[in-house]
Image (cartoon, rainbow, N blue to C red):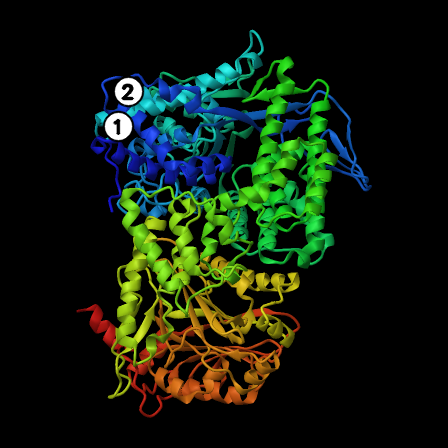
Amino acid sequence: MSRTIELDALQDVESLENALKLAYRKAKVDLYYSNDIRSADLVAYEAKLEPNIRSLAEKLLRSLNGESEDWAWAASKEFVGEFTLIAKRFDAKGRADGSAREPETRPSDEVRTGFVSFYADGSQKCRSAGATAHFRILSRCSIDMHILAALWIGAVGSKLEAALGIVPKNLESEERNTDSISSSFGDRLRRDKRNEYNWHSPGSFKSYIHQYRRWQRQGYRTISESLDRGESLVAVTADFQSFFPSLDAGLLLDPDFLEPQLESRMTRAESRLNSIFATALLGWRDAVKADLGDWNRPGEEEIPVGLPIGLPASGLVANLALSKFDRVVRNELNPLFYGRYVDDLVLVVRKTEEMSSGVDVWRWIEKRFELAGEKLELDFEGEDPDKIISICYGPPFSNESPLKFSADKTRCIFLEGEAGILLINSIEQAARERTSEWRALPEIPASAQDVKRTVVTAAGSDGEAADGLRSVHTLAASRARFALTLRDYEALAKDVPPDAWRDHRSEFLKVVSDQIFDLEKLFEFERYVPRLLQIAVQTRDWEGLRIQLVALGRSLRTIRALKELEVQVNGVPVAEALVGAAVDEWAGGLEMAMVTAIRRSAGVPLSENEILRIEEANREAGLSEKIFEGLRSAHEHYAALFASDLASTPLRALLLPHEWRQSPIPRFSELEGVLSSPGMPSALQSDFENLVVFIADRCASKETGQRNGGDGSTNRDAAEILRKAGGFQYPTRPMSAGELLAVTRAIARCDAASDSSAQSTVKGSESDWQSFIAGVRLLRGYSVDDEAPIRMVEASVDESSEPVAVVRVPRSTSEEDLDNRAAIALAAIRTTRDQLSAAAHDAPDLSLARYRSLCRLANSVISHSEQIDIMVCPELSVPREWYSRVAFKLQASGVSLIAGVEYGRSLRTEKAVTNQAWANFAHSAWGFRSAVMYIQDKQRSSRGEERNLLAENQLVLEPACRWGKPPILEHRGMLLAVLICSELTNLEYRAHLRGRIDALVVPEWNQDLKTFSSIIESSAFDMHAYMIQANNRVHGDSRIRAPYKDEWKRDILKVSGGSHDHVLVGSIDVRALREFQSKHDDPRGEFKALPDGFRPSEGRCIWNQRQSAHG
């Protein structure tokens, strides 16, 4: 499958159509993750994708290959689209400088914020006039223009971006001050291992958060190392003011810009595409300027319009616009560190004698720019040489105006000695904690009364340690904290039944309405309004929705009623006569965003009573009728959004186990009427057909079939739906490799170790793995290891032993072997008989208290001072509905999870249940954090379990996947096996595993502590392996047991009871055990002598591994 598009080879409409379909795949994902999802426009476009793409291809082909250079179609209003306004900030009277608001509180029922007061009765009173509302222009380009931009990114922009260099993954790989290493971290394109643009990955750009953290980490590390060497430093932080509106797309046509960026000349077709795209950008600018003509104040500065914010390609163009600036900084300033995140930069240089103040530093920078022939001007206040009021760069290229640095965001920080080390250490620590918070599971207050405090703290700026070189009292910091809090409540909306957290939700939505929907805060947090509304709609909390709508309506009425209100757009005041029009434009865009959010989350039809309640709330709020109409018809739109993978619940949920689904999905009868069957690009068609067949075959089998809802449909039906769904062909959130493994169970063939079927299983696994590889290539755009995960190994534990099959988790050569030391976290979790009974009847206990407890345990593992390798939970302890969220969060921190999940209903027999251990093995084999999902069934119930199930309406245990002998798993060099509770008592199982494994993991729900204690202790010696036992906290005796010689060392960890769920950590030394076994009873060793007849398998012998390594 070709990973490049050669424009000059596209000589006909059909070939160009295929290229544009690939571009549409990219553009759709880019739009989904932008500030403006445009879901309704995307659904409408995708419904007629073939004719829409053909029309665009015909126009573009004439322009690429024809003699004419008339590209007027690319600058037409129909093609470039329109604009709307989004909020930037709101300044009360006397706050025109835009500085961060200092919260004002007093010990009464009144909390005053800005110019608006909230009283105990919820009323709002305006207490001053003369406020200023600041807005930014957001583009609403046509979908055709987004596709053209995505094609330009891949065919031309990626070549221009290559001149920015490669962002090093660490400082050791960096060669400072060379053009091969980039200083630009933001808006970087996705590339493959060969550093070529990846046409088949989802979206065009790398993850924002990963690049941002890398930018921070490398800067902090450079400063720390320099200070440790005793150097004195100056750190400069700055960003450019009104950056996107200040840039002119004409730079793409400027030879002074293009020539230094390209290693070779553009082809004729590439040059023409570049010109067409630049024409479209300039056409949008001119169209918006024309629409804003009356908004400008006569004789004053016009509202600047540059690159369209909201068109993802603008980020790449803006990044490129500073390439000359980057070269000057690297080559002339000789920085210890220079990193730029689009328009935001950090510069670290050695302090010289001439640098005694910030002004001195900027004068030094100015001189070096002048020596390089570049213009950097400092503007001082009057005759005062010590007060800079503005700093201008450029213009960098002939078509542009000078770029100004934001005066209030420019700082020079002098760092030296112990004081400097303490400061940077505190900043690094705060940044690590913030990163850890993003990795963590939700942290929800214990009581609803505490919700208000957490929300107010998150949205404010008091009492937080700085997590950047700038002050923490910034809007960005407040937004980041609130986003964390919002993420926690969004997780609750998906994971916990609405009634189970009603009080917390009610308080959260009330506080949000009071605090976030206050006018000044609304401008700061506007981007989160749709997500807040979605929480109410998803949980069908109509009272919560009413409170939010009323608060929003009140703020909109307030701003419209303000006297002497000034409105600024892109930093320039609007004509007084058009102030109302500007406010209405913003309010209309906000209302449409609210309608879109509601439609994306309305998974269940509304009853007539619910519609009446919503209508009443909308009337009370005083919002436009389109809000109510949007709510009334929300479910009608939901199926189409879901089929296009634009609803809040991703389309891939159709295939996931029904317990993993966090929101309702449409019935198949609803989906069949909205399937667009848009057609795949030819380069992907073969992989697409193979994947659909693979999913249909595997998901329709008795072992892996899944129920899909109340209409009797199965996953075979789901696979057929996916064949026609635009959201599977053009996904916004495709299945991850780990989810695809879970759905198809391509690695979880639990009969692998059965000696009667091992060879055929391995052969079948190889076939499945090739289908999986093709699926990952199609869905995610990268390649995985060709080696199948189930392999035969010679396991000569005795002379009669046959080879056995081992399930091998993919691994990276850079990952540390667990056959050195592995840190194991044992979770002591209380599970009651009532909870077991409820789960057996498909009504699991999903209470908030239980959710909080499980999240707290996982978070303690994530934040543990020692890197944990595996977390083990008892039998039947983790609700199936929550396993995936916990496992994926642990996976992001490199932690694997082995847990006994609650009873699941059998798909083959109505009166049967399954008892399973689910394992999510974290790895980095594919260049990033991923995981392999493995499921193992308990084969037979114990006597006590059998009686308990029979008492539950005559239920029986029936495994979904049978095996004859316990499967063996290989994870990062360590060989282990899992036995569930009573399976430990099976002597044949233990005999089969003896000599073949390093550790045995036993999740239990066991009261017979004495019997099992004897088996665990004797098995540690008989099997000569580590025993990892996790039992229900009610009964205790969770432990890690080792076959050590000294009795006092044998229990590495042992715990019983406790008043609350908790986690304890112990380490096992696999290499030491293997070395002892390989030497055959070294009397000086720390382990007990090998039992009679014990022989380690060849793969576990240290001498054999060394021989293999040396050929």
**Does residue 378 appear in the picture of this structure?**
no
387 displayed left or right of 1105: right
Query: Can you tell which mark lies on residue 607?
Result: none
Looking at the image, residue 681 sits to the left or right of residue 500; the answer is left
Q: Residue at x 49, y 57 (%)?
A: 889
Q: Residues within 10 Å of mark 2 (few under 14, many from 20)?
A: few
Give whichever of discs 1 and 2 has the lower sequence position: 2
Provide residue 963's location: percent of width, then percent of height: 38, 78
Identity of the residue drawn at 60% across and 45% down:
534
Please tell me whether mark 1 or mark 2 is closer to you in this view: 1
Q: Secondary structure at mark 1?
A: helix
Residue highlighted by disc 2: 255
Rendered view: 344 above or below 444: above
Residue lying farthest top?
A: 299
Q: Position of residue 9 (x, y in %)?
A: 20, 33
Label pair 1/2, CB-CB below 8 angstroms: no
Mark 1 burial class by Cα count in 10 Å: few <14, some 14-19, many 20+: some
Q: Quadrant of residue 48?
A: top left
Q: Residue 304: x and y, percent?
A: 50, 18
Residue in the picture at 28% in, 20% down: 255
Q: Amino acid at mark 1?
A: Glu
Q: Indicate the quadrant containing the C terminus: top left, top right, bottom left or bottom right.
A: bottom left
Label 2 sits on a secondary structure element that is helix
Q: CA distance from mark 1 to mark 2?
A: 15 Å
Which disc number belongs to residue 270?
1
Q: Quadrant of residue 199?
A: top left
